[in-house]
Amino acid sequence: MNKIKIWFDPSLISDEKAVKIYRSIEEYPELYERVKNSVLDNEESEFIIQNVQMLNWVKGLNSFDPGDFITVEEISLRGLLEQNWGNIKIPEYMSEKDLKFVLEEVPQPKVVCDFENIIISHYLGVYFDENVFIDDIKVWINQFPYNEFEQIVKKSLFYKVWIRKKSELLANSNKGIHNLISLFFDNPKKFRTLIISYQLLKSYSLQLKKRFCGDYIESLNSLVESEIIKIDINSDELLEIKNAIAIELNSMLTNCEEKLDILSVISCTSGRLEKEFYIIINFLKVNSLLNVEEVREQVYVKYRELLSKNLVLMNNFEQLKRPKYPINPEKIDDFSTLIKWAKDEYLPYRTWLNKQNIIDKDIEQYSIQYSDYFYKNYIDIMFSYPYVMWKMIPNIKVEIDKQNFTILLVIDNLNHNYFDYLISLFNEEDISIIESKDYVAMAPTETKFSKTALFSSNYEYENKEQNYRNIFNKKMKSYFLTKKFHYTTEISTIDNLDDTVNFLVINFGEIDEYLHKDQGRMARSRDEKIKDELRAFFMRVWRVIENKPDADIYITSDHGSLKVSQEHELLVDQDLLEGKYIEKSERVMTVTERELQKSRELFEKEGYILRKDFFSLDTHYVVAKGDSSFKPIKGEYYVHGGLSPEETIVPFIHLKKSNLKLIKPTILIEENQYRYNVKTKLILSIENPNDVPLINLSINLDSDIVAVTDMKKQVNLLKELSKVTIEFDEVRILNKNRQNNELIVHLEYSVYGKHFNYEYRIPIKVNSIQENTFDFDDFDF
């Protein structure tokens, strides 16, 4: 008969949608009546019971009919999950309690895979199959939630699956990487540090790799063939390894005698650390090797990525020699690539030309090609390219909301050269670059257009408000509700800044004044005046942030500028242009619709027409093409308003203040195998990881397990980022405390008159094939 189906739900996972659920024994009379009526009416029925006693009573009803008209089937979490999740297999080690938690907390997977990967992906956002450590490591290693893992692994469900996955990978992976798999599953953070260490040390000496990578080197050799993890070179966890690399590199360069030796050393460096770069450059300077093309090229190839991300480093490198001639950009059809070309190739070479007062017609033509692309694709650039002037503050809003104290420095017309100099001033005070971008100014590249766009975060220019303070306050006070602002154009006002201010905005215009002045009318060079002004400006800012340990500083400009020459004057009808120049600009003029139609052919030949409707401006403008000017050029100065790379590309830097302290020197024992009571030589290596020398070092062996005639050694000077070897002769390791074989070393030294004293406890290994309680050297034979 089997007309009535009873579903038993002990885990209480059913919901009352299509089938009636009976939960308590008080509901049994109702259930009994419904079962009886179904039998009498010969109807098929289904019920769900969540009470064991009620289930037993219902089963008993079958005793009244030999046909067993009631059938019972249990609803299991395991079966429900397997069915709902695409017929996956649930492992036997999962308990009902675990599966109930899975049902409540883990959403149904979008991709059908094994159960363990569903759980791991839910918590970590990463899938792990048997090839994960070889084929897919680049995919997940940068996405893994290292900081959250310590809390995640405490969850019982995750821990069960995690341990199981570890066993599975160990069983199915090459034995050569078993130790790496075990390390990762036991301590992902340590695993990540190990991978980073190996990436930095891969080509350095085996001894240095062993120091930081230990017994994992062979496994890492087969696993890490290239860069697989992003490295934050400013991370505190890398401090020790960076200092060790610096010391090792100095030692290697000291032994270089030929060009091939130097090339070999450069090749073995990681190419990712600023310290490496500066050590190599300083060595090449001292040894007059900067003009050796092969050596310079090797440095550039090795540090290309680092140089591209660091304006100061790139500037230092490019100034050493004439930059490489830029390629012709005519085939570049992507704006990001064009910006990179301008930044990496065009601007360094053009800057060098300006300093040498050389005019290169081909380079000017390259500038026009850039301007043509910028003009033709302007609207697309403004809305598709992420780093345009009107998007600058929205791009950093989330960061600023989290910051305790923020400074935004908008320095009018600060071009790349002086920008790098200002950054170097901050670097001198251990204020480091966090992020560097290249933004694009608005067209035309006059102050009012880009600065209004920056402070209003608005693409359209209406010319209704020319007070930047009002523009800023109107937008930003509604944009940053929790910030207390201080906006100023007068640098002196920040000397007595209110303690409640946490967002300081300085709109600084003095540099623009110097750039527009004719060098022939100035008693000192423009460079000197601007650098003096920037240093004074920096000192004012420094006094504000000196006692703010977590200050964030953003530095940018509204546009750049172009050095023009007398032979680039445009011969345009002066009657037409009368009174049409924007103040102080030789590169831009306003025109009416009538004038535009009258001289369109001339304007299109000599410049770019910026129609007010298409470019969202207040009126029509025409900007000069190439290095040209609408006014006679009398003297040597900089102008802006056009669409050249110099005028449109604006640096943007985020710096963070840090409080660097002197680092404790490292003491290593070079030979760590001894026998009790046997005279031997003890060799210690002392490394100075600081950028300052250590004076009057005293090294004292102070341990009851050591017997030596001369316990103390002296070193007058240990230079910055260098090491020294100390030898103690006729040392005996005494068999006094075999449970604690530690060598105790006291190190004393001075830095700039300040005295330091450290104790080191260095474990030593003592072999005892044959133990002696006396020393044969004490007897005469």
Image (spheres, rainbow, N blue to C red):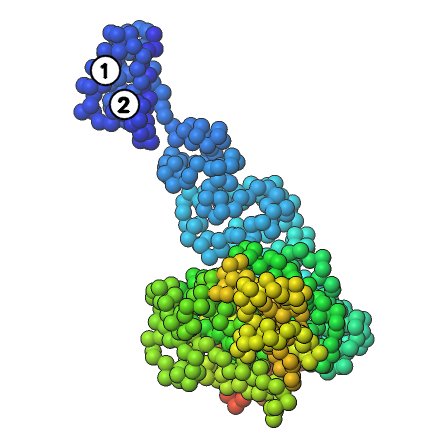
Residue 36 vs residue 275: left or right? left
Residue 79 is situated, as x and y percent measured from the top left of the image, at: 42, 28
Closer to the camera, 607 or 417?
607
Return the residue at label 2.
20
Q: Is residue 688 visible?
A: no
Q: Is residue 95 above or below residue 541?
A: above
Which image quarter is the N terminus in?
A: top left
Q: Write the residue at 41% across / 74% down.
A: 467
Q: Write the residue at 48% across / 30% down.
A: 86
Amino acid type assigned to the residue bearing label 1 in the image: Arg
- Looking at the rendered structure, the number of numbered marks drawn on it comes to 2
Query: Local crowd at mark 2 within 10 Å, few (<14), some, or many (≥20)?
Result: few
Q: Write the residue at 64% across / 80% down.
A: 632
Q: CA distance from mark 2 to mark 1?
A: 11 Å
Which image quarter is the C terminus in?
A: bottom right
Return the residue at label 1.
34
Residue 134 is situated, as x and y percent measured from the top left of the image, at: 63, 47
Q: Quadrant of residue 32?
A: top left
Lower position in the chain sequence, tag 2 or tag 1:
2
Residue 203 vs residue 733: left or right? right
Q: Write the residue at 42% across / 85% down.
A: 492
Q: Secondary structure at mark 2?
A: loop
Q: Is residue 185 above or below residue 493?
A: above
Q: Secondary structure at mark 1?
A: helix
Residue 21 is situated, as x and y percent measured from the top left of the image, at: 27, 25
Q: Quadrant of residue 695?
A: bottom right
